């Protein structure tokens, strides 16, 4: 388990770094200078987020099916991708973002009613449409903040945010596995401990200080606060997904990635944290 987690964790880190850095090189955001920046930012990263939405929704649909709920896969995937990438499309069209989001949500709601009518009639309307709205907002709306961070603040703040969150996950898992005794959230995730939480905080602060010092994203004192706060916020995202899995009586969202589970098990921490990170980067800018 630990070997698989370490091996596949390194592979995913290298692949993610390669994609994001290549994306930054293409649109000129790899350097601090704005002179080389292209008008359209974050294309490759946007594609990555869109692609991740597909297996994430498929995994969510299986969790929902365990509670006899129906995820309308064609609608949920398209709507999730549109919500997740809404900031990207605003680089091409002149429309207020809040109006663009309202239209996406409006047409999504209409599509859900039509799909329900065509395939399930009047059986389980509230439950089915409700769980679809939840999955679309959870996976689409929240991941949209990741794309917004990349486009509005650049490559390095995005990497800082992701690596702080994931280093907190690594710190929590490593220290919790070795020294965990006092349960952090026994009802939702019995494996989490306060000792692991301490490891998450230390790892997150170290990574945040490194990015702040090297990339000049924020003052060192702010990086310490950032690391401390986002260690907890990241674990909150993990617990949120754990609630869904526990309700469905599943340990992992899937078994596609040895040592991790599924795509949902990997992206759960950054999802909720991205909205808070966007606020922090607004303040820092």
Image (tube, rainbow, N blue to C red):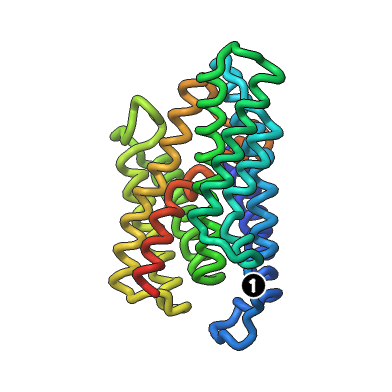
| Residue 259 seen by the camera | no
* Nearer to the camera, 79 or 102: 102
Point 48% across, 65% down: residue: 160
Question: Which residue is identified by label 1?
Answer: 24
Quadrant of the snapshot with the N terminus: top right
- Badge 1 element: helix
Point 37% across, 54% down: residue: 230
* Nearer to the camera, 280 or 201: 280
Quadrant of the snapshot with the C terminus: bottom left
Q: On the image, which quarter does residue 224 sit in?
A: bottom left
| Residue 121 seen by the camera | yes
Q: On the image, which quarter does residue 23 sit in?
A: bottom right
Where is residue 130 shown, x and y percent of the image? 51, 26
Where is residue 70 shown, x and y percent of the image? 61, 21
Q: Is residue 237 left or right of residue 43?
A: left
Examine the rendered structure and indicate whether residue 240 appears above or below residue 161: above
Examine the rendered structure and indicate whether residue 94 appears above or below residue 259: below
């Amino acid at each position: 388990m630990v070997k698989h987690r370490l091996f596949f964790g390194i592979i995913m880190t290298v692949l993610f770094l390669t994609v994001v850095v290549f994306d930054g090189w293409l649109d000129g955001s790899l350097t601090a200078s704005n002179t080389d920046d292209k008008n359209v930012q974050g294309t490759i990263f946007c594609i990555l987020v869109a692609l991740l939405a597909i297996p994430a929704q498929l995994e969510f649909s299986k969790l929902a099916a365990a509670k006899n709920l129906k995820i309308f896969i064609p609608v949920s995937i398209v709507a999730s991708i549109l919500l997740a990438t809404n900031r990207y499309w605003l680089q091409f069209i002149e429309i207020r973002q809040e109006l663009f989001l309202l239209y996406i949500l409006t047409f999504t709601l209409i599509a859900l009613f039509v799909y329900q009518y065509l395939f399930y009639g009047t059986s389980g309307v509230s439950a089915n449409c409700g769980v679809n709205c939840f999955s679309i907002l959870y996976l689409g709306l929240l991941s949209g903040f990741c794309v917004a961070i990349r486009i509005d603040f650049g490559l390095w703040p995005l990497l800082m945010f992701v690596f702080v969150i994931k280093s907190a996950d690594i710190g929590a898992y490593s220290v919790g596995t070795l020294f965990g005794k006092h349960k952090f959230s026994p009802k939702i995730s019995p494996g989490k401990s306060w000792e692991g939480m301490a490891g998450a905080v230390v790892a997150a602060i170290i990574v945040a200080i490194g990015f702040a010092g090297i990339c000049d994203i924020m003052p060192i004192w702010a990086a310490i606060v950032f690391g401390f706060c986002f260690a907890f916020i990241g674990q909150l995202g993990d617990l949120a997904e754990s609630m869904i899995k526990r309700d469905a009586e599943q340990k992992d969202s899937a078994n596609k990635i040895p040592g991790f589970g599924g795509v949902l098990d990997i992206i759960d921490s950054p999802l909720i944290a991205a909205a808070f990170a966007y606020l922090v980067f607004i303040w820092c800018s």
